[in-house]
Amino acid sequence: MSVSSTVFLGTPTEKTSDGFEDTYLFDVSRVYKGDLASVTSVGTLANGNGCGTSYVLGTEQLMFVSAPYDVDAEHEGYSCGPATETRFDIQAAVESVYGAGYAPSAGGTPSVGVSADRSTVIGGGAAVALLAVLGWFGWKRRRAQ
């Protein structure tokens, strides 16, 4: 449990995939370790590659996740981590270590369907600015004639 940077109880509500990576959107109901909003994203390698895993949409589960390494999401989930489907009461063990947990803060990831990295946003903004300047010069030139 201590190797996971975040432990929470949540329900996956949405899934996107690029064939290599699956990203799930989770509604978080309880946080045991870490600082989470009420909605967060968890990425995992698709098709069980490496330690990738999958989650059943609409099924609440206890999540042990870490900071992202191989995925573009807020957290990364693994099948090589603690097993939460055993007969052992893993939630009771978590609560004995971390306490009863707390409700997540409001907000979080709005959707996993759309994402852009910082360089894409900056490049897109620069392109729009350049087009605006060129359009303004074209308008001034036509107006001067």
Image (cartoon, helix red, strand yellow):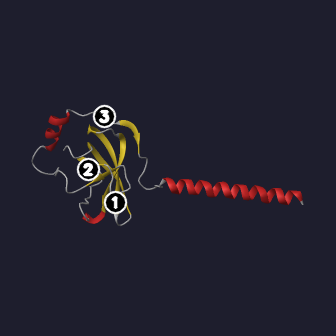
Closer to the chain start, of discs 2 and 1, is: 1
Residue 69 x, y percent position in the rendering: 32, 55
Contact flag, marks 2 and 1 (Cβ < 8 Å): no
> As drawn, is 14 to the left or to the right of 55?
right
- Please, is residue 106 above or below residue 26 in the view? above
Residue 60 in the image, given as x and y percentages of width and height: 25, 47
Residue beneath disc 3:
103
Q: Which one is closest to the eye, mark 2 or mark 1?
A: 1
Q: Is residue 26 left or right of residue 81?
A: right
Furthest residue toward right: 145
What residue is at 21 percent from the left and 57 percent from the top? 79
Amino acid on which the number 1 mark rests in the picture = Asp
Residue at mark 1: 22
Look at label 3 and name its amino acid.
Answer: Ala
Relative depth, front residue between 85 and 57: 85
Q: Residues within 10 Å of mark 1 (few under 14, many from 20)?
A: many
Instruction: Residue 83: give x, y in percent of width and height.
Output: 16, 52
Labelled disc at residue 59: 2
Q: Earlier in the sequence, mark 2 or mark 3?
A: 2
Task: Say what amino acid the circle numbered 2 marks.
Answer: Thr
